[in-house]
Amino acid sequence: MEDSKIIIDRMNELCRERGITIGKLCTISGATGSTVNDIMNGVTKNPGVFTIKKLCDGLGITLSEFFNTDDFKNSDPVIK
């Protein structure tokens, strides 16, 4: 699975768990809607760590918690 798809799926999962929309996540995290839309639509394939951190802060989780999934653990290495 493509890394950007893993990020999209993870963000959707976390929003579903909290009963919030992606739009609400933008509001509570302070991320711009255009930035998050680009991530969610696959336009941005490799979002920056600070953007992910901002979204994690809005979700009330750490970066470690965000990336602590089987999909991330089993993804192909970035450097081969």
Image (cartoon, grey):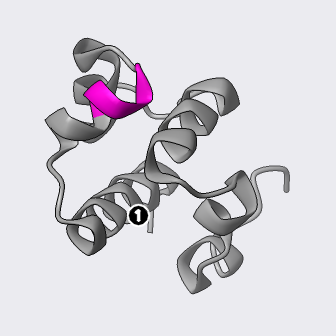
Which quadrant of the figure has residue 9? bottom left
Which quadrant of the figure has residue 6? bottom left
Q: Nearer the viewer, residue 23 or 69?
A: 23
The crowd level at tag 1 (other Cα within 10 Å; few <14, some 14-19, many 20+) is some
**Could you tell me residue 58's position as x and y percent?**
46, 41
Residue occupied by mark 1: 10
Which quarter shows the N terminus?
Answer: bottom left
Numbered disc 1: secondary structure: helix
Which region is colored magenta?
26-30
**Could you tell me residue 21's position as x and y percent?**
14, 48
Residue 27 is one of the magenta-drawn residues: yes
- The residue lying at 56 percent from left, 37 percent from top is 52
- The residue lying at 65 percent from left, 81 percent from top is 74
Task: Tell me: 29 left or right of 15.
Answer: right
Q: Is residue 60 above or below residue 68?
A: above
Residue at far right of view? 80
- The residue lying at 40 percent from left, 64 percent from top is 10
Q: Is residue 33 above or below residue 61?
A: above
- The residue lying at 22 percent from left, 27 percent from top is 37
Residue 43 seen from this side:
no
Q: Nearer the viewer, residue 32 or 1?
A: 32
Amino acid type, mark 1:
Arg
Which quadrant of the figure has residue 71? bottom right
Q: Nearer the viewer, residue 75 or 80?
A: 75
